[in-house]
């Protein structure tokens, strides 16, 4: 990955984190790494443990950010969630959300959409 891609991704994750906090989520961790990959944000929404995939793009030229969460990506996310749950003791409800961030440069104005429970688990 190139530096611009990593910077854009971090910007999107930062904006998503601030959004989640502003609507009452408690951030547990960011960038949870496992053998299979990474979960961008793990948060708590009341009693629900929420695994958040953040997709950030500069434009919708090749589709909206949320459309980048393909069936293959969803399957990978589910396996990452199973990995996390096998290593941590959580008995309550869980869900997988997607936060789509579209950053319109050069002003870095962002449009953010939060999709609750976008990935069936």
Image: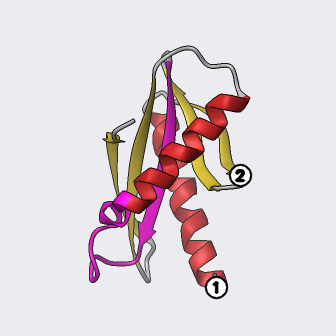
Camera-nearest residue between 113 and 117: 117
Measured along the vertical axis of the image, is residue 93 above or below residue 34? above
Residue 69: in magenta span = yes
Is residue 40 toward the left or the right of residue 119 in the image?
right
Residue that mark 1 sits on: 2
For marks 1 and 2 on the same chain, the one whose residue lies earlier in the sequence: 1
Camera-nearest residue between 14 and 91: 91
| Residue at 65% in and 36% down | 84
Residue 34 seen in the current view? yes
Q: Position of residue 116 (x, y in %)?
A: 33, 38
Residue 18 seen in the current view? no
Q: Which residues are magenta?
A: 48-71
Quadrant in the rendering for residue 8? bottom right
Whole-angstrom CA distance, mark 1 to mark 2, is 19 Å
Is residue 47 toward the left or the right of residue 27 in the image?
left
> Secondary structure under badge 1?
loop
Measured along the vertical axis of the image, is residue 47 above or below residue 107? above
Q: Mark 1, residues whose alpha carbon is within 10 Å: few (<14), some, or many (≥20)?
A: few
Residue that mark 2 sits on: 33
Measured along the vertical axis of the image, is residue 49 above or below residue 59? above
Camera-nearest residue between 71 and 52: 71
Question: Of tags 1 and 2, which is closer to the observer?
Answer: 2
């Amino acid at each position: 990955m190139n530096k611009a891609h990593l910077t854009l991704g971090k910007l999107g994750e930062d904006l998503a984190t601030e959004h989640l906090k502003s609507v009452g989520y408690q951030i547990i961790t960011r960038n949870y790494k496992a053998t299979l990959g990474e979960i961008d944000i793990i948060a708590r929404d009341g009693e629900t443990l929420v695994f958040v995939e953040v997709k950030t793009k500069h434009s919708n030229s090749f589709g909206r950010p949320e459309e980048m969460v393909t069936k293959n990506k969803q399957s990978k996310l589910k396996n990452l969630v199973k990995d996390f749950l096998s290593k941590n003791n959580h008995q309550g409800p869980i869900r997988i959300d997607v936060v789509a961030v579209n950053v319109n440069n050069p002003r870095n104005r962002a449009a953010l959409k939060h999709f609750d429970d976008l990935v069936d688990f």
